[in-house]
Image: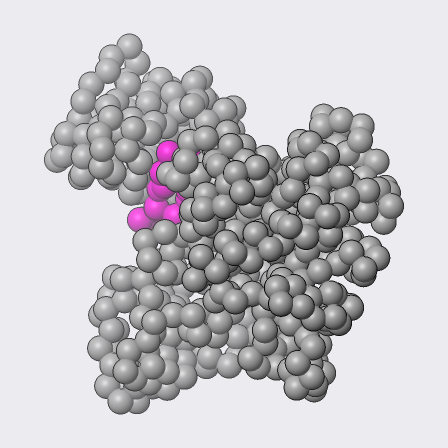
Amino acid sequence: MDKLKIFVLAGGKGTRLWPLSRENFPKQFINFFGNKSLYEQTLLRAMKLTIPENIFIISSKDYEDVIKGYTLSINERIAENIMIEPEGKNTLPATLLGCFRLNPDDIFLVMPSDHFIAEEDRFVKAVETAVKLAEKGGFVTFGIKPFKPETGFGYIEVAEKSKDFLKVKNFVEKPDLERAKIYLKSGNYYWNSGIFVFNCKAFLGAAKKYEPETYKLYTKGENYYLSNYATIKSQSLDYGIMEKVDKNSVFMVPATFQWSDLGSFEAIYQAAEKDASGVAKMGQADVFSLESKNNLIFNDDKLLVTIGIEDVVYVETEDAVLLMKKELGEKLKEVNKLLKEQKRPEVNYNKTGYRPWGSYTVILQGERYKIKKIVVNPMAALSLQMHHHRSEHWVVIKGTAKVTLGDEVVFVHENESIYIPKSTLHRLENPGKVDLEVIEVQNGEYLEEDDIVRFQDAYGRGGK
């Protein structure tokens, strides 16, 4: 399938998994299983289906920096195919943004970057079946056979059955519990995975017919629709296209692979490995459990002891702790709403900021000072920059730093330091093959991230 084009959608907020997932760092960038984030796993999965040149990333401006960094860690060629929306407008506008860059006869797969998929060989075979249907003009989705009356998913009602695919009769919105029980019992309903395969010409024809106002904006050229993006209607592929096209051309490939949208802590618990007591330990969890069972625990840097605790979720981050019964995950929507009303920064932001070159974590801050830990990826570099309102002192704790300071270039090794005065041109680089870790102490009258004047930048960022 080397000719298959793939759109990876990476703009979701993931607020149902607070405090792990925040608006500035949603769930697609989190390592839930293994040592790769869901986003990185999605790119690796895409590379099993087609060549890197055919993989396109579509995200919003909010995640441009972290998208570039994570993509470069997987494949430099894919990083050349990053498309950034000025703001998130749901899946239909994002798909149109990519589709106008394809040829009319191209077949393309649309998949979110925040799903968990196991048994990937089965996923590849399912995509092969979907591609054959799309080549004939079909609109194809993937359905998940339900195993419980789930109210958090949309459903697909199927009609005619065949060996490898089914005709779609109807798309159904998220049901209440009683209706979900009826769907489960009937056997003719599947969960809607939100993964699609289209023929580009057929897709654009459907968009022109069913979403004409949105379609017209894209026909006036890239600069036009990007500058008028705020006027574009937020719309999903399900509502905008799949529910409206002639159902004789809509097909569903049943998923034989393991799938989860990881949309709740209960879903993460179901997908996670568990010990003999049913306890799932995530992250670097150091947990001692006594007479405790069926718990989900995220805990990185402290010993956690549980005694007689059952069916709970415990999540500890740098700035927040969540403790709740597993079945009350829907209550997190209320928590997010209340925290926003109280203007708590924890609801949207964590203490770690991600950039194309690596990350920084705020360790401590007060009036006129801020202490950070900076991690620079191998062979990566910050921009050549200066600050008007702060000085900085860097102490290298791991690796070797290449530092530009005015007209000089010096190398700073572990347990060595260097001082950066105000209004001095400087750059921090990692010339090595392991992560560079630096403790940065800032001092001055203004210490926010927008006090940066950039002169050179490898990632195309201007001054902030």
Q: Identify the residue at horizontal 44%, vertical 57% (top origin).
A: 121
**Residue 385 at least partly seen:** no
Q: Would residue 3 be counted in the magenta stretch?
A: no
Q: Identify the residue at horizontal 24%, vertical 73% (top origin).
A: 287
Which residue of the protein is positioned furthest toward the front in this rendering? 163
Which residue of the protein is positioned furthest toward the top in this rendering? 407
Q: In this view, does 77 lie above or below 38?
A: above
Decide which of 69, 146 is in the foreground and name it. 146
Q: Identify the residue at horizontal 50%, vertical 49% (top origin).
A: 24
- Residue 464, given in percent of the width and then of the height, sits at 51, 29
Question: Horizontally, is 218 left or right of 266 in the view?
Answer: right
Question: Horizontally, is 172 left or right of 383 in the view?
Answer: right
Location of residue 310 (image quadrant): bottom left
- Residue 392, given in percent of the width and then of the height, sits at 30, 30
Q: In this view, does 100 lie above or below 286?
A: above
**Residue 248 at least partly seen:** yes
Question: Horizontally, is 301 left or right of 64 in the view?
Answer: left
Colour approach in the figure:
one colour
Decide which of 250, 322 is in the foreground and name it. 250
Q: Main secondary structure of the magenta part?
A: strand
- Residue 158, given in percent of the width and then of the height, sits at 72, 71
Q: In this view, does 60 lie above or below 37?
A: above
Location of residue 202 (image quadrant): top right
Q: Would residue 359 be counted in the magenta stretch?
A: yes
The quarter in which the N terminus is drawn is top right
Question: Horizontally, is 21 left or right of 400 in the view?
Answer: right
- Residue 181, given in percent of the width and then of the height, sits at 66, 85
Q: Identify the residue at horizontal 49%, vertical 71% (top origin).
A: 267
Location of residue 13 (image quadrant): bottom right
What segment carries the magenta color?
351-365
Decide which of 100, 224 is in the foreground and name it. 100
